[in-house]
């Protein structure tokens, strides 16, 4: 008789855990499943962003822990936003990393919004490692209330 691992059926990550274990078994188990690192951010997915659509604007929230506002570059062309940044951490003197998960170096990420935005009135705030970008939609794509008149 073999031992069967039990998993809750309502666990969203249950099937993904099974697939990861099977891949580990087939590939030599280089990494083990960890909820915080299973879905690693690739070069095109860093920094993690939330994009919120409102009637007249978009809000983008980016996680940039350890960055300074001088190390962040934001450009807008049409409806494409490009965010670049650089974070350099000195190597520890007289020691080596046992595990290193925090990113260092440079990144560049572009995001295309479905509508044109008004670059002239766009604003960005950086507070406690969170960059918040407010992107008003271009006047021609904003919803407008039309007054209906009677004859």
Image (cartoon, rainbow, N blue to C red):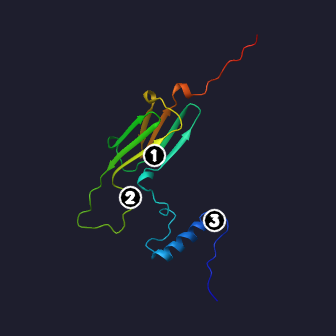
Q: Pick whichever, 138 or 105, lies toward us.
A: 138
- Residue at screen point 39% across, 61% down: 101
Name the N-terminal-most of marks 1 and 2: 1
Residue of label 1: 62
Q: Position of residue 112 (x, y in %)?
A: 48, 41
Label 3, secondary structure: give it. Answer: loop
Q: Quadrant of the C terminus?
A: top right
Q: Residue farthest to the top?
A: 151
Q: Position of residue 71 (x, y in %)?
A: 32, 44
For mark 2, does the 10 Å Cα neighbourhood hold few (<14), some (14 to 19), or many (20 or more) residues? Answer: few
Name the N-terminal-most of marks 3 and 2: 3
- Residue at screen point 44% across, 39% down: 81
- Residue at screen point 48% across, 34% down: 135
Residue of label 3: 11
Quote the CA–CA distance across marks 3 and 2.
Answer: 28 Å
For mark 3, does the 10 Å Cα neighbourhood hold few (<14), some (14 to 19), or many (20 or more) residues? Answer: few
Q: Is residue 128 at all visible to an observer of this figure?
A: no
Quote the CA–CA distance across marks 1 and 2.
Answer: 16 Å
Q: Position of residue 145 (x, y in %)?
A: 64, 23
Label 1, secondary structure: give it. Answer: strand
Q: Pick whichever, 2 or 88, lies toward us.
A: 2
Q: Position of residue 103 (x, y in %)?
A: 37, 56
Residue 136, above or below 72:
above
Label 2, secondary structure: give it. Answer: loop
> Is residue 6 found left or right of 89 in the rendered image?
right
Residue of label 2: 102
Q: Residue farthest to the bottom?
A: 1
Q: Is residue 76 at all visible to an observer of this figure?
A: yes
For mark 1, does the 10 Å Cα neighbourhood hold few (<14), some (14 to 19), or many (20 or more) residues? Answer: some
- Residue at screen point 63% across, 72% down: 7
Q: Are marks 1 and 2 in contact (CB under 8 Å)?
A: no
> Is residue 88 found left or right of 7 in the rendered image?
left
């Amino acid at each position: 008789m073999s031992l069967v691992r039990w998993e809750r059926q309502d666990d969203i990550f249950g099937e993904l855990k099974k697939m990861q274990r099977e891949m580990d078994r087939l590939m030599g188990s280089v990494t083990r499943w960890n909820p915080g690192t299973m879905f690693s951010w690739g070069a095109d997915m860093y920094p993690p962003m939330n994009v919120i659509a409102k009637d007249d604007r978009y809000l983008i929230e980016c996680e940039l822990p350890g960055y300074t506002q001088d190390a962040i570059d934001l450009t807008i062309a049409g409806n494409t936003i490009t965010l670049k940044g650089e974070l350099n951490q000195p190597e520890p003197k007289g020691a080596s990393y046992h595990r290193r998960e925090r990113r260092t170096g440079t990144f560049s990420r572009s995001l295309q919004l479905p509508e044109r935005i008004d670059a002239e009135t766009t604003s960005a705030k950086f507070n406690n490692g969170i960059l918040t970008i407010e992107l008003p939609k271009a006047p021609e794509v904003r919803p407008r209330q039309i007054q209906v008149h009677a004859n």
